[in-house]
Image (cartoon, rainbow, N blue to C red):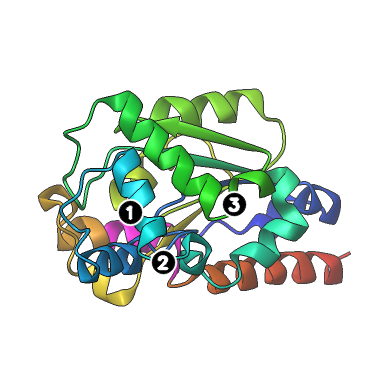
């Protein structure tokens, strides 16, 4: 069942919601970025400073991979937004560099696309975000909204007391998830329990709808 924020929160609290956002495949079109790296002969390069330089040399614009709707949303809500992003790549499988190098690459990616300066805070983690997300929940009294593309992460966050959890996944991804533990039965179960959007703009529309309905209910 999708949790309905409007049942529990006044317009004031909805206005004060905090947004905890994944980065890759939520704010940043990582798949298109990876495809463009391959088309420019950069697909096999490790995620280090050399790849950062190569992206610039190839004329690729980091900001071009930010999803539509992200900049406008952060312009209005950035002071209440925090990013929690893993520097471990599940899709590329390219984790051969030391963790400090991988963390630096992920930091630079968030900086160079223009997003880091627009949010309140950025938290970088290794493979598991759960500890960081739990700390945020424990330290925050405001209603928390979380959005991520990982079914496994969505399941984990659903246990942490977040007020609203949104799963970002296209219809194609619902049936092609590469993780064997996130097979059809798990995907169906997860999809039934949380709100699902297929674009960041759809997420923004949901937020707008929450606010509008809350205002009308008063």
Is 25 within the magenta? no
Compared to residue 40, the image places residue 16 above or below, namely above
Q: Residue at x 20, y 37 (%)?
A: 95
Residue labelled with disc 3: 115
Q: Locate the N terminus by quadrant.
A: bottom left
Q: Is residue 18 visible?
A: no
- Residue 75 located left or right of residue 3: right
**Measured from the top left, where is residue 138 in percent x and y?**
59, 24
Secondary structure found at label 2: loop
> Which is closer to the viewer, label 3 or label 2?
2
Q: Is residue 216 visible?
A: yes
**Measured from the top left, where is residue 141 in percent x and y?**
71, 31
Indicate which disc, 1 or 2, sits on the residue closer to the N terminus. 1
User: Given contact means CB atoms under 8 Å apart, are the residues at marks 3 and 1 in contact?
Assistant: no
Residue lying furthest front: 57
Residue labelled with disc 1: 54
Secondary structure found at label 1: helix
Find the distance from the CA under tag 1 to the CA under tag 2. Answer: 9 Å
User: Given contact means CB atoms under 8 Å apart, are the residues at marks 1 and 2 in contact?
Assistant: no
- Residue 210 located left or right of residue 171: right
Q: Which residues are magenta?
A: 188-197
């Amino acid at each position: 069942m999708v949790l309905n924020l409007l049942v529990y929160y006044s317009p004031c609290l909805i206005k004060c919601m905090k947004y905890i956002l994944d980065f890759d495949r939520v704010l940043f079109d990582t798949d298109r970025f990876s495809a463009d790296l391959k088309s420019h002969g950069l697909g096999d390069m490790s995620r280090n400073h050399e790849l950062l330089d190569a992206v610039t040399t190839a004329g690729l614009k980091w900001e071009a991979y930010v999803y539509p709707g992200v900049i406008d949303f952060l312009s209005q809500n950035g002071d209440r937004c925090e990013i929690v992003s893993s520097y471990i790549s599940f899709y590329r499988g390219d984790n051969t560099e030391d963790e400090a190098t991988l963390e630096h690459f992920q930091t630079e990616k968030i900086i160079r696309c223009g997003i880091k300066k627009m949010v309140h805070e950025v938290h970088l983690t290794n493979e598991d975000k759960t500890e960081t997300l739990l700390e945020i929940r424990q330290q925050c009294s405001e209603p928390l909204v979380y959005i991520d593309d990982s079914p496994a992460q969505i399941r984990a966050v659903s246990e942490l007391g977040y007020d609203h959890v949104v799963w970002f996944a296209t219809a194609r991804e619902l049936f092609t998830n590469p993780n064997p533990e996130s097979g059809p039965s798990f995907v169906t179960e997860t999809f039934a329990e949380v709100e699902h959007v297929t674009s960041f703009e759809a997420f923004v529309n949901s937020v707008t709808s929450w606010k509008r309905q809350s205002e009308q209910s008063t």
